[in-house]
Image: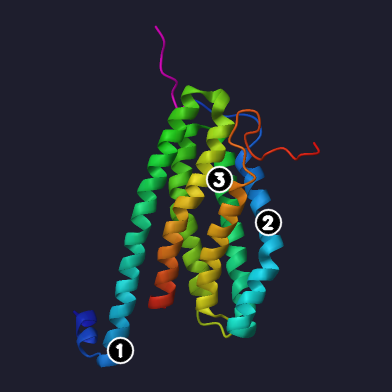
């Protein structure tokens, strides 16, 4: 309740800044979900491939590592939007 | 009757190709650092220089952590590797968040330069590295040098 009262007491500019920070945090959270699902799927399939064909593990690991890094770039873009708008 | 191999008990021995790739990315990051620092210095001054160096360090350490996590856990079990990669993703995002929150009010930080450096360095180095990666059974990490 105190938090709501504090929000209600904000002036126009403060309310705008608080709203921007909240939205940026929400956007960052959303931006992290997609890559999380992507990395889970990618690593799951890679583990399956390595368990079936251990002799190809080196090739699969290299591709998996690059895939993880590319997928993580999406989360980093969300993070950068967050720091540019929300901080 | 054949049984399916279990990812829980399967583990990988031998060299870790992701460590080789990440060290190569770090080497290329060192090559490209002066260019990024110079560009940031042009539009954000001295703050841009410090911010871009900080951003580059974050990205390169992030690459190395990601590779180290895969390399260490793959020697134990593939199932552990999968868990470590997923929780490692969260942990690394959290560490980057913490590292930026800690310096956001510092006098030498330019958030625009820091943010752009993080994205450009991460994507740029990955795309550059793609040219040198050999996804083949004979050379699982990097393509062999021509004179080798």
Q: Residue at x 64, y 77 (%)?
A: B49
* Residue A72 visible in this rendered orientation of the protein: yes
- Is there one chain holding both mark 1 and mark 3? no
* Label disc, if present, on residue A14 of the rendered structure: 1
The answer to whether marks 1 and 3 mark residues whose Cβ atoms lie closer than 8 Å is no
- Magenta part, dominant SS: loop
Magenta stretch holds residue B94: no
- Is there one chain holding both mark 1 and mark 2? no
The answer to whether marks 2 and 3 mark residues whose Cβ atoms lie closer than 8 Å is no
Give the chain letter at badge 3. Answer: B
Quadrant location of residue A25?
bottom left
Looking at the rendered structure, the secondary structure element under dot 1 is helix
Q: Residue at x 25, y 92 (%)?
A: A12
Looking at the rendered structure, the secondary structure element under dot 2 is helix
In the image, which residues are magenta?
B1-9
Residue B30 or residue B104, whichever sits in front? B30
* Label disc, if present, on residue B28 of the rendered structure: 2
User: Of circles 2 and 3, which is in front?
Assistant: 2
Query: At which x and y percent is residue B15?
Result: 66, 34
């Amino acid at each position: 309740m105190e938090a709501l009262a504090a929000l209600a007491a904000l002036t126009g500019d403060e309310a705008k800044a608080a709203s921007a920070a909240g939205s940026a945090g929400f956007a960052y959270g959303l931006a992290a979900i997609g890559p999380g699902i992507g990395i889970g799927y990618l690593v799951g399939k890679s583990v399956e491939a390595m368990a079936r064909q251990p002799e190809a593990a080196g090739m699969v690991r290299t591709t998996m590592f690059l895939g993880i890094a590319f997928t993580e770039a999406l989360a980093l873009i969300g993070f950068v939007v967050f720091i540019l708008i929300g901080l | 009757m054949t049984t399916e191999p279990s990812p829980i008990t399967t583990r990988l021995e031998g060299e870790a190709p992701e460590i080789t790739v990440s060290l190569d990315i770090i080497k290329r990051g060192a090559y490209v650092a002066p260019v990024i620092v110079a560009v940031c210095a042009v539009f954000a001054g001295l703050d841009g220089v410090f911010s871009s160096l900080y951003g580059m360090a974050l990205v390169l350490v992030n690459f190395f952590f990601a590779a180290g996590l895969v390399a260490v856990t793959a020697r134990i079990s593939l199932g552990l590797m999968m868990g470590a990669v997923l929780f490692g993703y969260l942990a690394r995002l959290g560490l980057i968040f913490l590292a930026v929150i800690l310096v956001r009010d510092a006098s030498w930080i330019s958030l625009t330069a820091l943010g752009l450096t993080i994205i450009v360095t991460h994507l740029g180095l990955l795309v550059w590295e793609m040219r040198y990666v050999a996804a083949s059974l004979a050379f699982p990490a990097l393509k062999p040098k021509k004179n080798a």
